[in-house]
């Protein structure tokens, strides 16, 4: 019995090969798991066929050239920011830990926040991944369409600080000899040809790091004050006027109706159902106008939208007030607003 115990204890299977990193597994042809946390480019939008998405092309290249089987999980959403990625990642349970994690944000973030706010959130996401999966290699991707250099600089700075495998696709596209029209569907999202460049660069970097015996970097000291951003959901409003409660959240379409939440965090987001009938609402934090949110979307989807950060420590109140207006994309004649709650940090 003692001999059998030792024998089974020392048997190696995929499930207990957790000490092997992705580069070890490439060398030994072990199965590799990856995770994509990203926006529409992260999910491969723009490709003419599903087979032309960057991660499918990468899977095929690794199988054909390295005899390495890789497969993935995806926390991706068109229009997502790093804030939405951070929250969704914290709420997602994976059946198997990934050996590779791709983080793909930036193009949407620059529409909703400052580069410093983006840096805090992006760092928090990198740290969350490293804490949860310390043996995973992180690929931080700077998207081909990101023309806001201060956002790209944040990705570069955080990547260098945390020792990630950073891939900047902007110079790759520029050096390809092909025009933006030839590489993208709509000047932003790559087409099949553009995604082939993504796959080529990631594949080349994986092989280079394998040859170099790259060591997975350990968790570094934080760059920003809000280093971890442990996000929580607040469901119960403190006050409401004109909103009714249903299975689709707190609902209103009448101008001037409002709903309020109390919170103590320094970062704030909202949980909304975005729909083809979605209207706009104005956001006030501590009595001051902050922003206007648009809840229109071409199909119904619960979304986690960034509102603001850098708030002072202490008690705050946020008011969401229906404006009775809608975006030009909303052709329904309705201005419905559905809110499920807010997201803030502990």
Image (tube, rainbow, N blue to C red):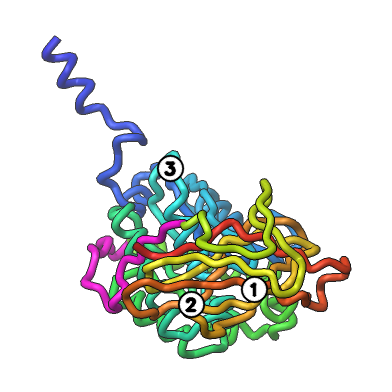
Tell whether position 226 is magenta. yes
Measuring from the top left, give residue 236's x and y in whole percent. 51, 55
Q: Which residue is mark 1?
A: 321
Per the picture, the main secondary structure of the magenta-coloured stretch is loop
Mark 2 closeness class: few <14, some 14–19, many ≥20 residues within 10 Å: some
The residue that appears at 36% across and 36% down in the rendered structure is 14
**Vertical relation: 236 (above or below) 186:** above
Disc 2 or 1, which lies upstream in sequence? Answer: 2
* Numbered mark located on residue 31 in the image: 3
Comparing labels 1 and 3, the label whose residue is closer to the camera: 1
Disc 3 or 2, which lies upstream in sequence? Answer: 3
Q: For the residue labelled by badge 2, is the local secondary structure a helix, a strand or a loop?
A: strand
**Vertical relation: 294 (above or below) 138:** below
Quadrant (top left, top right, bottom left, bottom right) of the C terminus: bottom left
User: Label 3 near label 1: C-beta < 8 Å?
Assistant: no
Q: Is residue 155 visible?
A: no
For residue 344, what is the image quadrant? bottom left
Comparing labels 3 and 2, the label whose residue is closer to the camera: 2
Left or right: residue 265 compared with residue 113:
left
Q: Which residue is mark 2?
A: 308
Of 316 and 101, nearer the camera is 316
The residue that appears at 64% across and 85% down in the rendered structure is 177
């Amino acid at each position: 019995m003692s001999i059998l115990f030792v024998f089974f204890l020392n048997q190696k299977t995929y499930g207990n090969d957790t000490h092997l990193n992705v580069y070890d597994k490439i060398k030994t042809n072990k199965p590799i798991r990856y995770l994509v946390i990203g926006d529409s480019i992260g999910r491969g939008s723009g490709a003419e066929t599903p087979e032309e998405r960057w991660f499918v092309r990468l899977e095929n290249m690794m199988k054909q050239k390295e005899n390495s089987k890789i497969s993935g999980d995806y926390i991706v959403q068109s229009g997502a920011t790093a804030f939405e990625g951070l929250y969704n990642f914290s709420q997602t349970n994976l059946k198997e830990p990934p050996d590779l994690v791709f983080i793909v944000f930036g193009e949407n973030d620059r529409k909703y926040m400052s580069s410093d706010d983006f840096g805090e959130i992006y760092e928090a996401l990198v740290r969350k991944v490293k804490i949860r999966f310390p043996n995973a290699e992180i690929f931080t991707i700077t998207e081909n369409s990101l023309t806001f250099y201060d956002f790209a600089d944040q990705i570069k700075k955080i990547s260098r600080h945390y020792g990630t495998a950073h891939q900047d696709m902007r110079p790759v596209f520029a050096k390809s000899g092909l025009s933006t029209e030839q590489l993208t569907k709509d000047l932003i999202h790559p087409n099949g040809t553009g995604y082939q460049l993504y796959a080529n660069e990631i594949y080349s970097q994986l092989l280079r790091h394998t040859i170099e015996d790259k060591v997975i970097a350990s968790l570094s000291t934080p760059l920003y004050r809000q280093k971890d951003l442990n996000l929580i959901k607040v469901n119960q409003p403190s006050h409401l006027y004109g909103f009714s409660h249903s299975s689709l959240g707190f609902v209103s379409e009448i101008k001037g109706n409002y709903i309020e939440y109390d919170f103590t965090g320094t970062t704030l987001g909202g949980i909304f159902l975005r729909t083809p009938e979605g209207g706009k609402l104005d956001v006030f934090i501590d009595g001051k106008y902050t922003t206007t949110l648009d809840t229109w979307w071409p199909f119904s989807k619960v979304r986690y939208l960034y509102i603001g950060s850098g708030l002072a420590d202490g008690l705050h109140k946020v008011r969401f007030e229906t404006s009775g207006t809608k975006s030009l994309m909303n052709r329904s004649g309705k201005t419905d607003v559905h809110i499920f709650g807010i997201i803030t940090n502990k």
